[in-house]
Image (cartoon, rainbow, N blue to C red):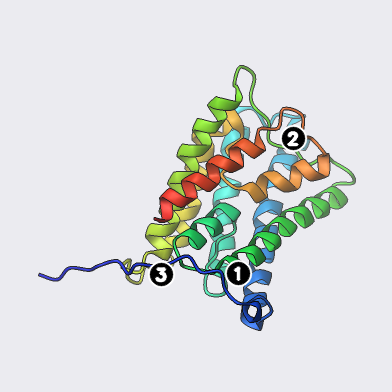
Amino acid sequence: MSINYHIHRRIAVGTREEATHPNALKAALAEFISTLIFVFAGEGSGMAFNKITKNGSTTPAGLVSAALAHAFALFVAVAISANISGGHVNPAVTFGACIGGHITILRGLLYWIAQLLGSVVACLLLKFATDGMTTTAFELSSGENVWNAFVFEIVMTFGLVYTVYATALDPNKGDLGTIAPIAIGFIVGANILAGGAFDGASMNPAVSFGPALLSWSWDNHWGLLGWASDWRRACWGCL
């Protein structure tokens, strides 16, 4: 009987040379492009649904549309960047990878900057392409409070990061091929179906950041608390 032991990994800061190394910059660029693609498709699907249904994105059909768009887009975004950067496409996933010792903190910072910029650029492109339509910031549904959203984000982000770790980061996972991007896309789509009607089901600080920045909609914005839950669950998911 063989027993596989997990290799203990330590949190590493990284070196100055790594921050400017071509491989690190290439990986950051991959995160920028993949996050841009993901946010453009996800946010754009909501804007398109609003346009053709006269702001009907909060209907059951709108929820299903958002879940499918995000699931498909994330599958593609992870698949195209997996062999370059690891296919994080999410600052919370990157944070978990740093805590788990899979990447250095300096590389993680590059990823965070790239991911947030990718989200902002995606929203800028959407605003230009739609002739000024407003990107929708995440908001709580009527009757929901910030603590309801906090619980939703805790559970959904933990499920997402745990899926990422189990299918993409775990050194004992073996060769899963394209299963990882598919599983990651599926869990995001399922979580949107579960929590989208309550808090928007972000699970991703970059997804929340771009629309909020462009619309400058910070009123009752629970994003900071949601981000805190994202970081915490990311730690638990990757340890």
Q: Disc number at residue 229?
A: none
* Circle 2 SS class: helix
Q: Disc number at residue 177?
A: 3
Whole-percent x, y for residue 217 in the image: 79, 35
Disc 2 from disc 1: Cα separation? 38 Å
Pick the front one: 52 or 152: 152
Residue at 69% x, 65% y: name it.
Answer: 33
Q: Is residue 158 left or right of residue 136?
A: left
- Determine which residue is flagged by label 1: 107
Disc 3 from disc 1: Cα separation? 25 Å
Mark 3, Cα crowd under 10 Å, few <14 / some 14-19 / many 20+, is: few
Q: Quadrant of the N terminus?
A: bottom left
Residue at 54% x, 50% y: name it.
Answer: 71
- State which quadrant residue 36 falls in: bottom right
Q: Quadrant of the C terminus?
A: bottom left
Amino acid at dot 3: Gly
Residue at 74% x, 58% y: name it.
Answer: 117
Q: Is residue 44 left or right of residue 237?
A: right
Whole-percent x, y for residue 159 in the image: 43, 45
Whole-percent x, y for residue 106 in the image: 61, 68
Counting residues from the N terminus, which is met first, the one under dot 3 or under dot 1?
1
Whole-percent x, y for residue 194 in the image: 49, 33
Q: Are marks 2 and 3 in contact (CB under 8 Å)?
A: no
Pick the front one: 134 or 18: 18
- Determine which residue is flagged by label 2: 50
Q: Is residue 211 left or right of residue 225?
A: right
Disc 2 from disc 3: Cα separation? 36 Å
* Circle 1 SS class: helix
Counting residues from the N terminus, which is met first, the one under dot 2 or under dot 3?
2
Mark 1, Cα crowd under 10 Å, few <14 / some 14-19 / many 20+, is: many
- State which quadrant residue 147 falls in: top right
Q: Is residue 160 above or below residue 58?
A: below
